[in-house]
Image (cartoon, rainbow, N blue to C red):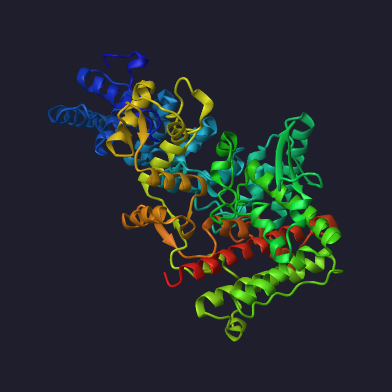
Amino acid sequence: MNFDDRNNRVVFYSKGDGSVYHNLKHAEYILKNINLNTEFSINDYLEFYHIKLHFDNKIFLPSWKESEKINHIKISDELWSSVKDFWIKINENNFTEHLNKVDFRYAEAFWELIDYFHVYKRISRDKFDYLLKYSPRQINYILKFKNIVRKFDGLLRNFLMNYKNSSELLLRQYSEKRTDKSQNFLFPNKLSLIDKEIIISDYLEQNDCNLNYVRLVVNLKNSNSLRITSKTRLKAKRKASLLNEEILQEGHTWNIRIQVSLSVEQQKPVKYTNENNVFTAAYSINHLDDQKNNLELFHVFPDLFQYVNKTKLISLVAKERELDSFEKVSMKSKHEYFTGTVFVKKNFLSNIQLVIFEDYLINQRGSSLQRVIEEFINGYLNKYFIRDFKFKFPTPVSTYLEKIRILAPEFEYLLKQYRIFVEEGFIDFELLELESMSLNFSGIKSLVKIKYCYSNNDKIQILKFQFFSVQSMLYYIEPYNEKYSNLYDLLIQEDVQLEEFRNYQKGLINNLIEEGYLYIDSKNFVKINKPIFIYIIGELSNQNVLNYWRYPDCVRKSIDEMLEDNLLISDNTLFTKDEQNYFNFYLNKKNFTNGLDLRNKYLHGTNPSSEENQKQDYYNLIRLIVLALIKIEDDVILKRCIGSN
């Protein structure tokens, strides 16, 4: 080419990395200055290919006139012809020579064209075997192309059985949670399920195996493509424990310290402090004493302990927005309920709350958690909303093991009763006796037609990011800098003029103005337009869902408009999707391989033998029962308030 300076080379990535604008500006430079009589290198041909990919996908610079666009496409087509002429001349004699010259950024594109032009048909097994032997990392690109994998099926199987990183390739494909779809691998048919397990088992014996991949093995969900035995899973679990212990010894750890206390002097219902990395929640005994009966004591859970938020959504669930930057980018299994530090803190706090509340009930009120729950069901739900709700409690002298084995099936039976009540208008116990299917949380409907609203609309996702994400950076301006964490808070709290935004921010701010989400007031300040609409976007950003009837009329009116415009979709289940995942995480391994499996492990006798662990599981189960009852109460109250709506 006439310009060999690497700074002038078009850098296109087949994965779409980098700036499209930057790519197209460089493409423009090439197309305007190209000399078609120049002798091109293989990397030049790969650049021409990526220019064609942009044009084939109708990606052009907005500044190009129609005549420029037509001319650029014409030159690109001519260059593509030269690419084809070059590629059809590649054979096993010059194949390795060309590959050695490929810039690493174009490696995948090289194999893509090897596949597209069927060059692989002109490569012998011996040459391909030689390539894998001396350039094994090429396997990361080769496994993306079906025709190549099919041609060298047996040879690739033999290579993978001996390749050190084969296990990581398998786990990236079948276990790791990824957003990059281009990373899919196609493994040879001759690589059997037994072969794959041998590869993983051998990997676990390596001294330098990666803890992240070991955890993926622990949380692997068996499928028709990859399955492991309990023996291999246990091997991975022990390896993970060993590697974790090494990390502890090296000191790369942090503590999560939470304290809960009851105070006689304190008048405020609850005080929170966070000092020296210790979070403390202090509750007033006077406030607890003011609760007149067990029904009022039950409402300590939603109100004082904040098991649910102001719109009656369970606050203990794991939320992606609560993950820190490191947790968001860390490797995780696609079948894992990924908790994060905030979830762990909420779990610790709610468990300690239960233990200390139980102690208060026994010693100060002559009651217990079970008695409070029992009276809530029999003296409240049964009396005012649902007839014949049945729930059997274990005796006070039962062991934790005995309590769990009674409570787990009773909890499921309770939810099945409510499902029948919603469907039939009463609890038909004869109908219930004929059902033997296990409980599906998504199948428990609500009494109200519209219960929750969700959105996967692209426009909503963009607005959530622009107004409420800490990563949008639209809020970061002088003199406030890090005072706010999103654009919405900045504009609500401060008077900001358009000129105060940086140049790279002004384009997006102007777009939001043009689209009617912002406006410039009479004093030249940038203000939020459609405040209720943007408030709803914020609720979706924080909770992922709206509990429709828990908002005032003015907000519901805007929600109705969004439903009509297909910006939102409604659902009428008892639990939100996040809440369903939360219950499944604790009770079974239906969706998550790292679930606690409280129901099944006690039913099948695979529960822990430690009484301390059984005590922990008991309180986990009590918490789930309380949460389900809070959701049922919300549902029956809403139905009574809104009537037939």
User: So how many labels did they put on this image?
Assistant: 0
In this view of the protein, which residue sits in the foreground, 162 or 591? 591
Q: Is residue 76 left or right of residue 346?
A: left
For the question of whether residue 251 can be seen, the reply is: yes
Residue that extends furthest to the bottom in the rendered view of this protein: 430
Looking at the rendered image, the quarter that the C terminus falls into is: bottom left
| Residue 383 placement, left or right of 55 | right
Task: Give the side of residue 113 with respect to residue 255, left or right.
Answer: left
The x and y percentages for residue 335 are 58, 52
Check the image and report above or below for 523 versus 591: above
Residue 454 in the image: x percent, y percent?
A: 44, 54
Query: In percent of the image, x 43 and y 42: which residue is there?
Result: 464
Q: Residue at x 87, y 69 (%)?
A: 397
Q: Nearer the viewer, residue 179 or 45?
A: 179
Q: Residue at x 48, y 33 (%)?
A: 471
Q: Quadrant of the N terminus?
A: top left
